[in-house]
């Protein structure tokens, strides 16, 4: 039993993976709260899928994945901004068109004859294949992200709470939106290597949505979301280690299970209270 | 509060709109410290537009507007998010941000002032209560506390009486009286004519300024009819002898374009 718990920590590959999921668990949990408050879950999913051709191109050309992800993000953001100018479309339609086009382009590139092996890692992540340099870059970006979110916290909160009055408080709502989107881009850069293009959204939405059900103030909610992110990350790695399942998918599954469990528990508790409460 | 004396806001021949025909025109008024000004008019009459011009969010298309010092707004409480995980103190503390550069967090001193503001609006004991769990009247007073923490002498209140019960209404009126005694200029958008008659001044808007002055002089029958674009109907009040109560029957409902 003890060995089952300790074994993953003795394996350097799994140990690096534990460090990585801890880093992205904290970043994803904290940033995820803002994603939820600003209603950006769909935007987060779109950006993470839209950067796919960048990842594939980097892999095909032998460039660092981080560079490919950054280029892909920039291209996706520009394409969405351009498509949004097409008259007669609502806000979501141009995003959906751009994202499916880019994802299709990425798939086309990924399935070409010269495709090197390991491209499925781009879709589902390869948290067990990270190097020490990958980890170091992730650590630097996560610390920078947390410092920036800490500094901007009061203003992000004021805009999220009451956007219409923000200007009266000397805060430009546009600047707050831009800050959250830049933070989202940085978090995607860090997390996409470990969790992959398709699963990274689970990290940015799952822990925060779960914490939202439990916490009544923003700071505890962020702490809780970070803890849930790290715990689910490590739980997923354990599942992967012992059951031989895909690491990224196991982590995403742990996050979904955590949300489903907490949502069920809070619903049952609320129903129970409602039944006990006297009428009137 | 930096304040050089004189009116907090002065408008002359003011007009404003959103590119098309002006939403308000011919506005000429002044609000001094301590003035409680009832802002009357139908929906779409230009009350919100006037607030936006005073806040600097919208430029006048004609005339002039002079604002002395900073302005704080108290929005309608149902516009804010009730499911948002913040306490009354968190909300009041947001007022401090208007005085701080973007990288600075509110200090311990700001926190003390936010608690004092909650004390002023008689909600000190609810400082840690979730904002969404307070009553409508309490939420309104928390938003007033946020405006007080901003240190602005001029407060713009957007229909603060909307949806309040009798007790909350009385409390809010008493609070507005106290703020006026402290030297705050208050512009209060309202539909309550009876309430507005108790205040120092009324400003009647219906896409142009209909009247401005003390309610006893400004609020005559012709002004009210022009303000609401409606005919007044006199209804005899039961059991009150000579006294009559008036009802406004609008010809049709006005909405924002």
Image (cartoon, coloured by chain):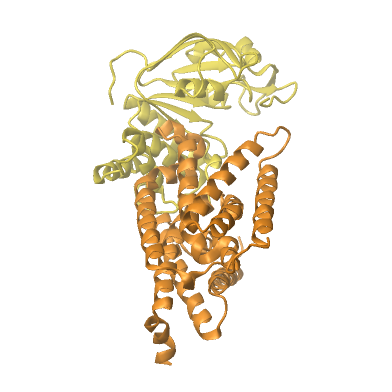
- Name above or below for residue A199 compared with residue A172: below
The x, y position of residue B254, in whole percent, is: 69, 24
User: Quarter-wise, where is residue A259 in the image?
Assistant: bottom right
Task: Tell me the quarter of the image containing the N terminus of chain B.
Answer: top left
Q: Which chain is orange?
A: A
Asked whether residue B84 appears in the rendered view, the answer is no
Q: Residue at x 39, y 57 (%)?
A: A142
- Name above or below for residue B58 compared with residue A188: above
Residue found at the far left of this picture: B109
The x, y position of residue A158, in whole percent, is: 43, 42
The x, y position of residue B37, in whole percent, is: 46, 20
Task: Tell me the quarter of the image containing the C terminus of chain B.
Answer: top right
- Name above or below for residue A147 compared with residue B9: below
Q: Residue at x 52, y 69 (%)?
A: A126
- Name above or below for residue B213 compared with residue B79: above
Q: Residue at x 42, y 35 (%)?
A: A171
Relative to B46, A180 lies left or right: left
Q: Which chain is yellow?
A: B
Comparing A61 with A260, the one in front is: A61
Relative to B106, B200 lies left or right: right
Asked whether residue B107 appears in the rendered view, the answer is yes
């Amino acid at each position: 039993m003890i060995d089952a718990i300790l074994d993953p920590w003795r394996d350097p590959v799994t140990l690096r993976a534990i460090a990585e999921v801890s880093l992205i668990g904290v970043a994803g949990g904290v940033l995820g709260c803002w994603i939820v408050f600003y209603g950006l879950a769909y935007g987060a999913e779109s950006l993470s899928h839209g950067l796919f051709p960048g990842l594939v191109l980097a892999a095909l050309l032998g460039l660092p994945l981080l560079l490919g992800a950054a280029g892909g993000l920039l291209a996706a953001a520009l394409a969405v901004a351009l498509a949004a100018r097409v008259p007669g479309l609502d806000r979501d339609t141009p995003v959906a068109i751009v994202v499916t086009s880019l994802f299709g382009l990425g798939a086309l590139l990924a399935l070409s004859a010269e495709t090197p092996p390991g491209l499925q890692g781009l879709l589902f992540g390869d948290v067990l294949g990270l190097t020490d340099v990958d980890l170091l870059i992730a650590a630097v970006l996560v610390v920078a992200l947390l410092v920036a979110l800490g500094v901007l916290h009061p203003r992000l909160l004021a805009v999220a709470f009451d956007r219409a009055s923000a200007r009266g408080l000397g805060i430009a709502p546009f600047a707050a939106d831009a800050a959250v989107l830049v933070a989202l881009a940085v978090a995607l850069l860090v997390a996409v290597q470990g969790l992959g293009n398709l699963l990274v959204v689970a990290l940015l939405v799952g822990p925060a949505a779960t914490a939202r059900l439990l916490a009544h103030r923003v700071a505890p909610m962020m702490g809780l979301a970070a803890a849930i992110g790290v715990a689910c990350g490590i739980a997923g790695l354990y599942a992967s280690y012992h059951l031989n399942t895909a690491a990224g998918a196991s982590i995403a599954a742990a996050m979904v299970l955590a949300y489903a469990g907490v949502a069920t528990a809070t619903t049952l508790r609320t129903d129970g209270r409602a039944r006990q409460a006297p009428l009137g | 509060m930096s304040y050089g004396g004189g009116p907090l806001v002065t408008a002359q021949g003011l007009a404003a709109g959103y590119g098309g025909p002006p939403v308000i025109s011919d506005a000429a008024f002044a609000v001094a410290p301590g003035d409680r000004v009832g802002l009357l008019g139908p929906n779409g009459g230009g009350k919100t537009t006037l607030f936006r011009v005073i806040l600097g969010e919208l430029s006048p298309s004609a005339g002039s507007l002079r604002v002395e010092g900073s302005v704080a707004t108290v929005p309608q409480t149902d516009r804010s998010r009730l499911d948002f995980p913040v306490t009354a103190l968190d909300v009041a503390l947001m007022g401090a941000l208007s005085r701080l550069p973007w990288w600075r967090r509110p200090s311990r001193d700001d926190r003390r002032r936010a608690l004092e503001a909650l004390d002023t609006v008689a909600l000190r004991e609810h400082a840690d209560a979730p904002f969404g769990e307070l009553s409508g009247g309490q939420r309104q007073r928390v938003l007033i506390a946020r405006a007080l923490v901003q240190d602005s002498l001029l407060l713009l209140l957007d229909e603060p009486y909307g949806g309040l019960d009798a007790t909350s209404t009385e409390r809010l009126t008493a609070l507005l009286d106290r703020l006026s005694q402290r030297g705050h200029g208050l512009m209060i958008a309202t539909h309550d004519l009876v309430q507005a008659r108790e205040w120092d001044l009324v400003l009647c808007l219906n896409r142009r300024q209909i009247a401005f002055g003390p309610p006893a002089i400004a609020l005559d029958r012709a002004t009210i009819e022009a303000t609401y674009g409606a005919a007044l109907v006199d209804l005899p009040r039961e059991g009150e002898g000579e006294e009559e109560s008036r009802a406004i029957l609008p010809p049709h409902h006005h909405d924002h374009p």
